[in-house]
Amino acid sequence: MRAFLERELRRVDHSVAEASALLPEAEQTTLERQAAQAARPLANRWISLPALTTLRAFDEASGLCRCAALMAADRDFFPPVMPPVTEAEVAWRLHRAAAHPYLVAQLATAAFTAASTTQLDTARVRDLAPDGTTITLHDHGLRRGCMTHPVPAWARPLLRAAAVVWRLGADTSGPLFSDPLGSTGLPSLTAFAEDCKLRPPQPPRPKVRRGRRGTTPSAKEPVKTIWPVCTAHFGLSWARTEPDLMQGCPYPPPHTRKTIDRRKKGWLPPDYGLRELRPPR
């Protein structure tokens, strides 16, 4: 066999790789695993992302749009910024998530844009820059208008992977966050987020009363994740008449220059927040 291989390889240009580059890495030792765990202070914890508060929506995506959208900052829209420790943990989980590339890319985009599923469904393969540095989402003016968002470095490989799957079939017009392979049995976006222990901020849990001495506290039952329906980012007055279904979840943080500046001063304008808490005009 060796002589046969050497004879055949003389006919083509080739290079011999080191075996260590092809073999799987050795399993981590206990100390290495403990060191990796110590470097991830949020490991195995639920992470509440305010950007996911506006993920669910009551409307559906409309027709295709080929506009040259402005950057989100030029539209006066500023998604919530994740602290560095949270961002590192979210990136770690999504880069190691065992799911279809389009699900990982869709959840990553929701985390850094605070977009709803309606807006995510408008993204086509061509809306992602070739180098993955920007992505354009459309909404036909229902919220803040069509916007181009910068893609953080940690999310670029995830979005490019979703685009590559579409380009394998020479199709650049398909929905970026959909499965061109027709896979079955994949989880929904919210179910996938929960698998990654990512969810919107939840209602405050009631305080547990301490039992008598000597009594064993009952085991805590797992709390089901609440996915609210929030219209905070809607720009049209008639769209805001739809009811907020927050179910006790905190309202998302301010997202415009005015509301962000006023939050820093300790107060918000009357046109922001839960409608039942707004003063009469």
Image (cartoon, helix red, strand yellow):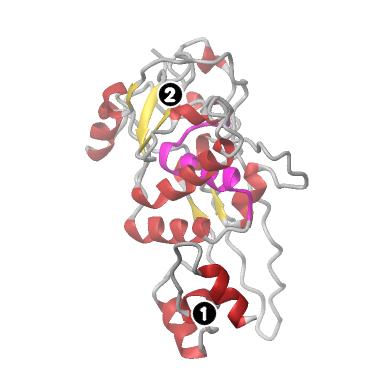
Depth check, front residue: 183 or 193: 183
Q: What residue do we see at 50% from left, 80% from top?
A: 19
Q: Quadrant of residue 98?
A: bottom right
Residue 279 pos. (x, y %):
40, 21
Depth check, front residue: 188 or 8: 8
Depth check, front residue: 217 or 37: 37
- Does the magenta run of residues contain 76? no
Asked whether residue 250 is in view, the answer is no
Which residue in the structure is indicated by mark 2?
Answer: 278
Instruction: Please state if 235 lies on the left or on the right of 209 as rendered.
Output: left
For label 1, the crowd category at 10 Å Cα-Cα, with few meaning under 14, some 14 to 19 and many 20 or more, is few
Which residue in the structure is indicated by mark 1?
Answer: 25
- Front of the two marks 2 and 1: 1
Label at residue 143: none
Q: What residue do we see at 47% from left, 43% from top?
A: 159
Depth check, front residue: 265 or 223: 223
Mark 1: amino acid: Glu
Q: Earlier in the sequence, mark 2 or mark 1?
A: 1
Report the magenta residues as a range: 99-118
Residue 243 pos. (x, y %):
59, 22
The furthest residue to the right? 185
- Does the magenta run of residues contain 103? yes
| CA gap, disc 2 and disc 1 | 58 Å
Mark 2: amino acid: Arg
Q: What residue do we see at 48% from left, 33% from top?
A: 115
